[in-house]
Image: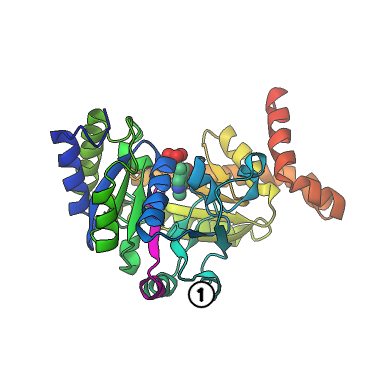
């Protein structure tokens, strides 16, 4: 069982191993059952430890679907059916330090962000922005929370995305790759500061989960981490990610009417199309060529490529050639759709997310 009250060799070994590979003084661990559960625990830690009531998150952020994490999501689509959610959450444009300064005050417990926004459409936070947040959080006593649930475990070309900027958060949340796609697990890793440690020690049960941090989960997470570290998979993410990025940039040059921008870091890449509807259409075209690619939940015009970190060179070539083929299929659809999309009403309907989802289901149902 995962309960923190039932410590075991496997839990302790994995927790120790995890903090050893986290540069900076991130050296305390609480396990969680999922990413959303870890985000909930991190926000509770910040609220409880500071005694403050306000949380700042980012427009287009994605942090999960449970209480605090859902409230921190920066898109109404996920939230509107369940309001009222948790109080005192406010949202900032990602990357805008002045917006942070306008909203942050001495009642702000934490600011939470993904160092590279995933669902938001692969937006990389600049080093200056992160350093600025760190500085102002220190001045105002605000806890800086990094959600590394997508960016962690080597995906961006470093083991943790925060290493690119050397800005160490107060609290980091992890999930997804922590279980290697085999077994769910999650973790809240935090700094040993008086405010956080005192709260954790006085309230050892403030966030518990029977499932998160189970012995099986920790044994698997431990092996996953060993494999990543022994094989320095972040270096492969950097190399193969660079290769795919170059391939995508070439496709952008050849298809300026379709591709607006290629961005990201390591093996966390985003391809922004000129119109919202193109993300869903391209997902369809790629699936016909055997590739499963998701457009970003909070930015449907951006396709996310988060390919396994073990990708080989021939596989990277194959990825690019499949995308090339899928673009050819998409161009056939565009002969009809592009003129239609220029008509204001039809353009609005085409780019509406609900219409996109139901038309894709309709086409599949009838075997297209
Ligand atoms: C950045 C980020 N945070 C939090 C979550 C929530 O994780 P989980 O689905 O494990 O609850 C996700 C899941 O996609 C995520 O991408």
Per the image, the residue denoted by label 1 is 101
Ligand 1 - quadrant of the structure image: top left
Q: Position of residue 155 (x, y in %)?
A: 36, 51
| Direction from residue 344 to residue 350 in the image, left or right | left
> Nearest the camera: 199 or 326?
199
* Circle 1 residues within 10 Å: few <14, some 14–19, many ≥20: few
Can residue 343 be seen here? The reply is no
Query: Which stretch did the figure color magenta?
Result: 136-151
In the image: residue 105, left or right of residue 175: right
Q: Quadrant of the N terminus?
A: top left
Tally of marks:
1
**Residue 142 within the magenta-colored segment of the rendering:** yes
Tell me which residue sits at (44%, 42%) in the image: 36
Q: Is the C-beta of the residue carrying label 1 under 8 Å from the nearest atom of ligand 1?
A: no
| Residue at 72%, 43% in the rendered image | 332
Give percent across and percent down for residue 366: 73, 23
Name which quarter of the figure residue 164 lies in: bottom left
The reply to whether residue 300 is in sight is yes
Q: Identify the secondary structure beneath mark 1.
A: helix
Q: Residue furthest top?
A: 366
Quadrant where the C terminus sits is top right
Looking at the image, is 102 positioned above or below residue 209? below
The quadrant where residue 159 appears: bottom left
Front-most of residues 251 and 295: 295
């Amino acid at each position: 069982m995962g309960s923190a009250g039932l410590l075991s060799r496997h839990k302790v070994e994995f927790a120790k191993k995890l903090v050893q590979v986290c540069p900076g003084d991130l050296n305390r661990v609480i396990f969680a059952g999922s990413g959303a559960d870890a985000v909930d625990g991190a926000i509770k830690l910040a609220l409880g430890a500071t005694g403050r009531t306000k949380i700042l998150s980012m427009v287009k952020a994605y942090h999960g679907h449970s209480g605090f994490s859902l409230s921190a999501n920066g898109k109404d689509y996920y939230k509107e059916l369940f309001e009222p959610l948790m109080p005192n959450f406010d949202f900032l444009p990602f990357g805008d330090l002045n917006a942070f300064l306008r909203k942050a005050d001495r009642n702000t417990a934490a600011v939470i962000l993904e160092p590279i926004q995933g669902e938001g459409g692969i937006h990389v936070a600049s080093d200056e922005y992160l350093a600025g947040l760190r500085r102002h959080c220190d001045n105002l006593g605000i806890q800086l929370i990094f959600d590394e649930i997508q960016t962690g475990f080597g995906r961006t070309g470093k083991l943790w995305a925060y290493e690119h900027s050397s800005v160490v958060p107060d609290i980091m949340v992890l999930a997804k790759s922590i279980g290697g796609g085999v077994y769910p697990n999650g973790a809240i890793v935090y700094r040993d500061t008086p405010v956080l440690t005192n709260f954790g020690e006085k309230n050892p049960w403030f966030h518990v989960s029977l499932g998160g941090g189970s012995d099986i989960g920790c044994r698997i997470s431990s092996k996953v981490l060993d494999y990543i570290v022994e094989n320095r998979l972040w270096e492969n993410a950097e190399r193969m990610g660079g290769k795919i990025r170059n391939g995508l940039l070439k496709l952008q040059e050849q298809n300026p009417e379709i591709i607006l921008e290629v961005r990201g870091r390591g093996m966390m890449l985003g391809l922004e199309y000129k119109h919202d509807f193109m993300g869903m259409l391209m997902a369809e075209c790629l699936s016909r060529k055997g590739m499963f690619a998701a457009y970003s939940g909070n930015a449907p015009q951006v396709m996310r490529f988060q390919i396994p970190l073990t990708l080989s060179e021939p596989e990277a070539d194959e990825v690019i050639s499949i995308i090339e083929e899928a673009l050819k299929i998409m161009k056939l659809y565009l002969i009809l759709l592009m003129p239609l999309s220029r008509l204001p009403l039809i353009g609005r309907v085409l780019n509406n997310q609900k219409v996109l989802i139901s038309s894709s289901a309709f086409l599949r149902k009838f075997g297209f």
